[in-house]
Image (cartoon, grey):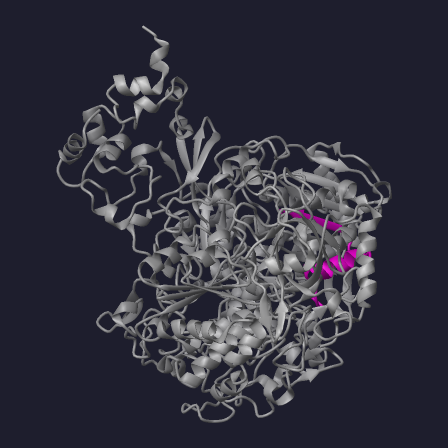
Amino acid sequence: MPTREQSLAAAAAAGGVPDYVVAGARLGVPPGQAYLIATGLAADGSGGLATADRARPGVLGTSTQHLANPPAHNPTRDENVVRWVAERGRSTLHHPEG
Amino acid sequence: MFSPLNAWPLVRQLRGPDRTGRGAAAQSRRSATLEPRTATADRVVKSVCPYCAVGCGQNLYVKDDKVVQIEGDPDSPTSRGRLCPKGAATLQLTTGDAREQQVLYRRPHGTEWEALDLDTAMDMIVDRVLAARREGWQWEAEGKRVRRTMGFAHLGGATLDNEENYLIKKLFTSLGVIQIENQARVCHSSTVAALGTSFGRGGATTFPRDLEHADCIVIQGSNMAEAHPVAFQWVMEAKARGATVIHVDPRFSRTSALADLFVPTRAGTDIAFLGGIINHVLTEGKEFREYVEAYTNASAIINEDFRDTEDLDGLFSGWDPEKGAYTGSSWQYQGATVQAASGERESDSAAEAHRPSVSESGHGESHGSGGQAVPQPDTDPTLQDPRCVWQILKRHYARYTPEMVERTCGVPQDTFLKVCEALTANSGRERTSAFVYAVGWTQHTVGVQYIRAASVLQLLLGNIGRPGGGIMAMRGHVSIQGSSDIPTLYDLLPGYLPMPHAHEHDDLQSYVAADKAEKGYWGNMSSYTVSLLKAWWGSAAREDNDFCWDYLPRLTGGHSTYDTVIEQLEGRCKGYFLMGENPAVGSANTRLQRLGMANLDWLVVRDFSLIESATWWKDGPEIESGELRTEDIGTEVFFLPAAAHIEKDGSFTNTQRMLQWHHAAQEPAGDQRSELWFIHHLGRRIRERLADSADEMDRPVLDLTWDYPTHGPHDEPSAEAVLAEINGYGADGRPLSKYQQLRDDGSTACGCWIYCGVYADGVNQAARRKPEREQDWIAAEWCWAWPANRRILYNRASADPDGKPWSARKALVWWDEEQGAWTGHDVPDFEPDKRPDYRPGDDARGPEAIAGHEPFIMQADGKGWLFVPAGLADAPLPTHYEPQESPIDNPLYARQRNPPRTTYGRPGNGYHPSGSEPGADVFPYVVTTYRLTEHFTAGGMSRWVPYLAELQPEMFCEVSPALAAERGLENAGWATVVTARGAVEARVLVTDRMRSLRIDGRTIHQIGMPWHWGPNGHVRGDAMNELSSMALDPNVHIQEVKALTADIRPGRRPRGAERRALVESYISRAGITEQTGRGS
């Protein structure tokens, strides 16, 4: 099992924002586990994050669920609906220009 | 080599690397093979908790198209990953074995359920709908055109999606049904009328997360820590930052335990308490003077005919004792012509005679997103004129002294003054305070005025529209806000447009002209209305036919859920749809609810499990008592199993007006279907059946736009397409971005104008989920809130009249001179480029008539209303009246009860004598009701869930040690609570949490009762609402269940016919008749 220092170093290896996908691949552990080892915080967000925790080394300022969870399903656009509403508008509404 | 010794954890610990025993050494062979359910999932579907209206984010973990685990979504800015016990039990609710999967049918006079296939059931329901509709059809009523049916009714919607509510309202309205209601009537209808008239919109002015910025939080009429525990984290955040938290309640709870100050009070006296604080503010000069002068109607002069309760000993001017109603013209502004809630038709002399019917209609909810039409009144900016609102306010509240508060509420004066000091010290330019309430305020015969009292106070203290301020209405069902906005409510059309009343001059022009405002955004009411008609009737709605205005059925008075029960009892309402609501447990006077259903021809229940409203005919209390016999009941009952939120797409609108989308993660099993499916296919089948009809009554349903695309194995209609219709679109087919784009020439369609923008750019804005850690506290990119994605309403008031923040500490939005625009953290609740020094010309109308220093843009005068000159049926100023049933005489006025409240004098709904009236001592104790963390409303979503049932297994009542001693009650023993409506039994919890109070020299005992139980489910008990009566607030027809009187006695209640005999003996002893308690 990698140590905290190893996890932090691996995540920081690419420079910039720590990358735990890279770290996990390099260390042979799942990305979420690399994050947990590095920060002491569960990547799936199941632990409470106090304000002080956000200052820990390696903690990301973004959501970390993707490190521990399978892909998220949250579509925000359905082209079929966009086409349907376009047809509804054109067929039922009065065109002001006549 | 395996050694049994190694199986011992201690040996493993000592021999292995884990010497401290924190990890591997503590693991058994079995636990070593286990893995979390989340680990097996192949995707995470974003969703929302289906219980209360906090709207916590949920992650649905899915494997092979089956949900295997449900957890909190840490990205949610509302919940930050937390779930309460109910939310944490959602997997069991949705995937457990308590959900029915097959349609069940009870034939008339049948004694058992029978299986029925879904297709046949749908056809049979179509038959019954068409027959009942025709049988109850009315072209005219009281000599006026109504074009409606009284033949059947609908109840339920607050647990459903917005899209489902929309189709329910659309289909049933097109069929001429007016008796369409949901839980919002019985839970928060008071909120809409109170906040709507005070500020312009009927929703909470703020959002739970912003409570973290409050310097003082008063929680009253709410047990937030237990009823809305996840939202309560923001109160705790505020406390951690130094805020003072105050809890005012009849019962000590976890909220009290976490507050800095707990104030025990008598149930039903909150107006006296809040009035006392108002008086303290006014007499001590603690108001935020600049805010009051600039942003409220304090300077407005009231009509010289106005008389206050001070002048008429508890009545306002305009009281008509024969009609039992106020004619409110004397409450109006001087120099302004006030239009009544339903417009010109009710303000002319002929219609004035019908005003009681308007108040009976509970019309106070209309304009829940906007105020009444009022031109500019005469004003006195010095606030010295004796007829200005400020002076009237001072006179009105002068008698609400600390001594009077103590006499009325039982709150010691020093405790009361601590509240006053905390609240006023934490309000003003640099500091803000917030109020949080729930149904402890709404469910009274003066429910609207409870919330109005807080509104008056928050305006005086300058706490509206500012961070850390506001009034937070905590709603109890996941989308009860949505089912008010897109109303399955009889008196409203979508977006708080009023349902039209029957009238002789009934066309679209007169409706709009009568009801629209000359000033503010209600000035565009014709655009909202025509766009709705175009959304519903498409090509058929043309200018030359008044855009099908005549297709809308008309009201002639009250048609609330309680009026519907009377219609059922009288045999006029023959059919009933229940969708996710359980009136046999959750509505007041459950016995009359069941007797009403026993008088129906047919009943359709759609729910997860066999709730009491589905099974009363075979195992209800009246069967046990012998009052009804199953074989004699002719009601035909269809039970259709419902789909859960994990099985359908759709949006919920939470308590902060925020629409949050949830995605389907699996297909429903067996006959389970969504309400969207049910209504869509019911409508499709009805339209097919009527396709060849030439009958004029069928035109509205045949002309409906009902072309929603479907998908999947069950032809599920597209919820997103319905959302797109709700949002609105233009003639070019593009979704609209904002309601300012709506037109009244037929070139735009919009199903709910306040939701316009939720589908802007063809993007489902309600599905946006930018993680909370990547945004500020406003979290504007998490889903979408009405109106226009604003999170704090009236936020123009966070800046001074010149557009500068009142203080840097409380900055929210402000005028940026360089940009020539309003800017800040939130979406400005103001025209973005309207300068603070803008002043409208005399000919300005609509939004243009709002000046640059008037933050309440939905109000016709741009002001927050301390005094309500129009729109409410009972009072322009909150006034303390005792509850319908009270052990004491009103200490403040000669009038005991709210004079125009709605009562029903009929057998089974008898009211108790109060105070010094003969017989009042038969029911000497005050009962108040509440919910528990582990159960949900009428129990349909918790009593069948084993985790939750185990946590709260039995109905109980809480009594003080003093009351226990007085009545011989033993802790954990049984007690029977009796009223003139019923008798229930409950386990006794003797606890100091219930305080006995000294009121006017007397000791008043109070009894606390949760209301979740009923005879069905894993955990069973008597329903508290067997005890309650139908006594209603006159504005919105909400029932009074937070304060009533009762007797309590040791032991279990009688069984069989003896139960009713016990109730009758109490009625006899108290001398109750149908007229008891119906005077003022």
Task: Using the image as rendered, state which of residue B1019 and residue B730 is in the foreground.
Answer: B1019
Q: Is residue B605 left or right of residue B930?
A: right
Residue at far top of view = B1
Q: Position of residue B961 (x, y in %)?
A: 60, 57
- The total of numbered circles placed on residues is 0
Residue under the point 52% across and 91% down: B387
Does residue B986 sit above or below B252 in this rendering? Answer: above
Q: Is residue B940 visible?
A: yes
Q: Which residues are magenta?
A: B555-580
Does residue A85 sit above or below B901 in this rendering? Answer: above
Q: Is residue B466 left or right of residue B401?
A: left
Residue B813 sits inside the magenta stretch: no
Q: Position of residue B311 (x, y in %)?
A: 61, 90
Does residue B266 sit above or below B81 in this rendering? Answer: below
Q: Position of residue B382 (x, y in %)?
A: 40, 92
Q: Quadrant of the C terminus of chain B?
A: bottom right
Q: Position of residue B90 (x, y in %)?
A: 51, 39
Task: Using the image as rendered, state which of residue B265 and residue B393 is in the foreground.
Answer: B265
Residue under the point 52% across and 60% down: B438
Residue at far right of view = B632
Does residue B24 sit above or below B1035 in this rendering? Answer: above
Indicate the quadrant where residue B893 lies.
Answer: bottom right
Q: Quadrant of the N terminus of chain B?
A: top left
Q: Is residue B554 visible?
A: no
